[in-house]
Amino acid sequence: IISEGEAATYQDGLWYGALSEFEGFNGYWFITNQAVDFEFDLQDAVSFSRKVSKPRDMLIGYEFNQSTMQSFYFVKEVSLAEEGDWILAYNDDVIVGARAWDGYMTDIPVMGYDGDDYSLGYMDINECPEFKLYQSSTGKLIDLYSTDQMPCFANNSTPVLSKLNNTKVVLPSKVTLKGVYPNPFNPVTSIQFNVEGEGMHVELNILDIQGRLVDRLARDTYSYGDHEIVFDANLLSSGIYFVQLITTEDIKYSKIILLK
């Protein structure tokens, strides 16, 4: 359940997050992956409708604007975090969210850029936030790194992070050639590959049976995740060809057959 600056998620029979009650005049988004029944008992409709929303807690000196674009990162564990500390979210050097550390599954708001000036510098779709720990006892800011692959920003999303560490975890970087479909093909096929890591330089070529380059499909840096490139062999003759995937770490090949 998502509201303005607050969220709650249901896991293993329990609710977690800063959103703990419904308030009059507020809107709520319900996200579910299965059919559910929901009811809300308004025993005192008059007093409920007149209820004034409670002010949102802010850390002085690290304020941010509420945006119409937002997501919430639920964090199970943070190294060095103690009661009274804060978890801050940044997009480069722009603060885009903050939440007092409340223990297991604290929801950290992350604001996105919605086109208005007040949200300039906030997260764009597919940008990944950075997190810092504010130690109330010392006033220090400590960089935090996720032990999981960091999910990038998406509006109204609620990703869960296992742990934020003060030590950067170097994730293995590799590219996997997942397959070509259809194969055999005539004359168009799709080549799929997966990038594991912060970003990898990938070159994708088509070679003939003698190993000669007949087409270069890609030469670029690709972000984490699955990618697909369409190969149109309309100008080539029937026969056996090879997909060549080159990275800084490895070279992979896959045989393809063009039938016209």
Image (spheres, rainbow, N blue to C red):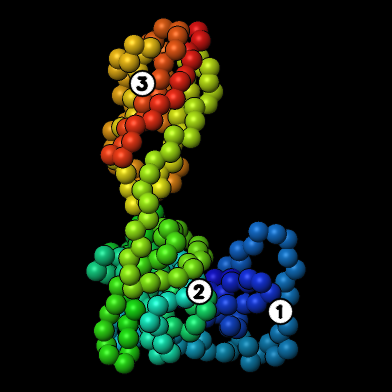
Whether residue 151 appears in this view of the structure is: yes
Mark 2–mark 1 distance (CA, rounded to whole Å): 29 Å
Q: Which residue is mark 2?
A: 76
Whether residue 28 appears in this view of the structure is: no
Left or right of 241? Residue 159 is right
- Crowd tier of the residue under label 1, counting other residues whose Cα lies within 10 Å: few below 14, some 14–19, many 20 or above: few
Q: Is residue 53 above or below residue 243?
A: below
Tag 2–tag 1 contact (CB < 8 Å): no
Q: Which residue is mark 1?
A: 40
Mark 3–mark 2 distance (CA, rounded to whole Å): 46 Å
Viewer-proximal residue among 133 and 16: 133
**Amino acid beneath label 1:** Phe
Q: Secondary structure at mark 3?
A: strand
Label at residue 206: 3
**Amino acid beneath label 3:** Ile
At horizontal 49% and vertical 82% (from top left) the residue drawn is 103
**Amino acid beneath label 2:** Lys
Q: Earlier in the sequence, mark 3 or mark 2?
A: 2
Judge depth for marks 3 and 1 and give the one in front: 3
Q: Earlier in the sequence, mark 2 or mark 1?
A: 1
Q: Is residue 145 above or below residue 77?
A: above
Question: Which quarter of the figure has residue 15?
Answer: bottom right
At horizontal 60% and vertical 83% (from top left) the residue drawn is 21
Mark 3–mark 1 distance (CA, rounded to whole Å): 61 Å
Q: Earlier in the sequence, mark 3 or mark 1?
A: 1
